[in-house]
Each structure stands twice: as C-alpha cells, then as structure tokens.
Amino acid sequence: MNKATSVYLFLFLTKSGKGHPERNIPMVKRKTKFICQECGYESPKWMGKCPGCGQWNKMTEEVEVSGPARRGAFAHSQGGSAILSKPTPITSIESVSEPRIHTDLTELNRVLGGGVVKGSLVLIGGDPGIGKSTLLLQVSSQLANKGHQVLYISGEESLRQTKLRAERLDIASENLMVYAETNLEEINRTIDQTNPSFVIIDSIQTVFHPEVTSAPGSVSQVRECTAELMRIGKTKGIAIFIVGHVTKEGSIAGPRLLEHMVDTVLYFEGERHHTYRILRAVKNRFGSTNEMGIFEMKEFGLEEVENPSEIFLEERSRGAAGSTVVASMEGTRPVLVEIQALISPTSFGNPRRMATGIDHNRVPLLMAVLEKRVGMLLANQDAYLKVAGGVKLDEPAIDLAIAVSIASSFRDVPTRPTDCVIGEVGLTGEVRRVSRIEQRVQEAAKMGFERIILPANNLSGWKGPEGIQLIGVSSVSEALQAALGG
C-alpha cells in the first residue's frame, strides 16, 4: 500500500467512525440532541413544546458521547456482564428476606420499611433548607456509632462547613469520613479505597462524570451518574443515599427516569415557619409506599415525634364552626388531623375556592354535591379550606370531613369536640366504605373521641372499642344530621 492510498483509507475510515486501520484507534462520536428537563423526552431537534409532557421551553441541548469511552464507563451499570443470566422458573428462585440495619430514628426505620437495606439506592428530595443534610448527617453519625464505616460525600459544602454542622449536632465519630468531591471517577476510586458500608451523596445534581460532556445537573449527567452509583451499590452491597434538588412545583429535578432507577424515593416536607417536618415515602421496593414519619426541627437537630395525632390536635379550637377531625391513613399508620373551613359571601363575580393541604379540585366537587344533594346555596360563597399542622392529605376517606366542615361554617354551627368523621363521598351524595376502619377507630378512641361518624357499610364484621359510639351513615344528609343536627 503506497502512501497516497494509506492517507485516503485513513480519511475514509475516520469519517465513517471506524478509526485508524493500523493503529486501531477508535473514533469517538458526538451527537447533539435535545432532552426535556421534565419528562426526559429526546428529540433530534429543538421544539418549543415537549411532545411527551406538553410543557413549553423545557427542551435543552445535550451532547451525547458514544464509542468505547462511554461503553467502558457505563456498560456494567446494571451489575456487570461477567455473570450471564438465563430465564429461571419463579418457583425455583430462593426467597430470602433482606437484612436491615436499624437507625436510632424509629420514624425513619418505619418509612424505609423496617431499616436500611444493604445495596439499596435511596433518593431524598425536599425544598432548600428543609433539613435534608441535617437528617442524613444525623443518620450517618448513628450508623457510625454502631461500628459501620460511613462515607459522607459533600458536593455543595466544604469540609469546614460540614464540620460546623457536625459540631452543632454534637457529632464526633472516627467511622464517619467526610469527602468533598464532585468527580464521579474520584468518588468511585475513594469508595474502593475506604470500602464503606454506607455512602451519602449530597447532592446528585453536583456530581458529574468527566466522559459525559454536558454540564453537571443536566439530564445526561444525572442519569449516567445515578446508573453508575446504582452499579456500585448493587455490586458491592453498599447502601447509598443521594440528595436530589426539587423544582418550584415540588417534584425532584431532573428526568423522571431518576425516580424509576432508585429503590426508594423519599420526600422531606414541611413549612419553614413550622418546626415539624414530614418524611414521606412515595416509592419503596422494600416496604409500603405512602408511609410517613414526623420529625421536629430543634436547635440540636431533628427529633422524632412518637404521637403525631396529639401534635396536630393540640392547638385545636373547641366549639368553633368549620372544624372537623378526620382519621387519615398515612401508609400503615392512622393519623388524626383537623380540617378547617371558612365559608363567607363573595365580593366578586366568581367565588374563590382555595385549599391548603388537600387537592384544590376536591373542594368545588364536594361543594357541588352539597348544593345539589343537600340544598345548600353555595354558588355565591367563597370557600377557604386548610389542613391544620402543615400535613398533606390525598386519600378519599377525608371527603366526608371536608363536607361537614363546609356545612358547619356555612350554617355557623360548630361540631362536637369529641366527634371524628370518616368516609368517602360520591357524586350522588352517598357515603362509601373506606379501608382499615378498625385502625382509624382505635386511634380516635386512644385520643379520647367519643363518637365516630363513618359509612354504614363499614359497621359489619367487627366490633368497636368500649365507650365509643359508632354512627353509620349512608348519605351526606344523614352525616350532616348526625354531626350538626337540624
């Protein structure tokens, strides 16, 4: 082969992406694409409106790197290709209970399904300043005091800033190592050297892989870094906690794929002006979902609240119109909360409907039922509803309590302080049965309530505790007659 032919062949193979024919130098391809920051929809060109989620101005440009460099870094993201798997009958798979490691926070253990599972990947999201780093630093200290090696990786704070928080929380343990780094290759190398049992990443939006050309926090970086962390945790049996930023709507920033990849998704909620924080599980492969843990933020860190019903009802105004107590199920735990309603004549052409802690679409629906089935004239009334204590409720069993609160405020007739209302309301005005009625009634009896207004279909097959009067109702009209009279 002469020189001219060799140069021609080199240029041809380089343009085709096959690299140098003699030196075996591969060609790394770079392709530009546009990814939606909300749903992760990919498009070869920019579009103003995302076809996946329908949001405007969410498509951002990303440079995708393909070739051996990318394949070498992420080919084993699902646990390695050295072990070849084959289809196995489900009856021949051995069932093994996952060993769990308990922390000193009982509320956190319940939300996680009984404790921390080795090799699990847990994502924690919440508003800035809500206490995510404080919670994870406390958990790191507790696990370190039990003899476990913990590696706390901070991508947003320096070592001195983390030390200041540790001094405030009175944390000092030789097994707790702090590392300030955002390069994923350096993080992986440090994990290999220290061999920890637990790793905390604060936060995933600051971590980047040098072989992915997009900026830290982008869809590609978050997706690939999470896949690499998942591979590390699964292959080495390390429990990894990662902190995720949230958008202004309250959902975790980045692609929706991030929540699908991890084993557990926790949301840390609460108002900045309140000391109480709520840790809620929306996904858990090792336990029940919608589990809730209550914490109180104090000067020296977070303390768990053992009886949240007492906390939510301690400032309740007795004898006030528009106040109703409902027993809501949060995962496996019944919680008593107060629903407040304020109904007043409107000063505008269109009456206002506002709600805090419940779905705002549920308020006009229940007001329409009261107007159509009970005969209340609410079309010219403003309605303001709130769940006291900052907790958010989304189950159908709170419908009847909302309706009773609205009727109580509209008629200016207070409910009994010892009444608890439970039930789902249909559009025809019927009161439908709810689940786990025994646990709800037991929690109400423990808190000193004397009468429980509940669906009539829930009365069969069990017996209530002594001293509790169970009033079964089949319609909203019967419920209002029992709760308000007249």
Image (cartoon, rainbow, N blue to C red):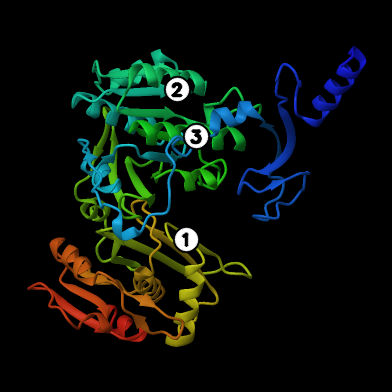
Disc 2: which residue: 188
Disc 1: which residue: 355
- Amino acid type, label 1: Ala
Q: Is residue 240 left or right of residue 217?
A: left
The answer, for residue 132, to whether it is visible in the render is no
Q: Residues within 10 Å of mark 3 (few under 14, many from 20)?
A: some
- Amino acid type, label 2: Asn
Examine the rendered structure and indicate whether residue 305 appears above or below residue 154.
below
Location of residue 340 in the rendering, given as x and y in whole percent from the top left corner: 37, 63
Secondary structure found at label 2: helix
Secondary structure found at label 1: strand
Total labels: the figure holds 3
At 66% from the left and 26% from the top, the residue drawn is: 213
Instruction: Tell which of 473 and 268 is nearer to you.
Output: 268
Q: Is residue 89 left or right of residue 220?
A: left
Disc 3: which residue: 76
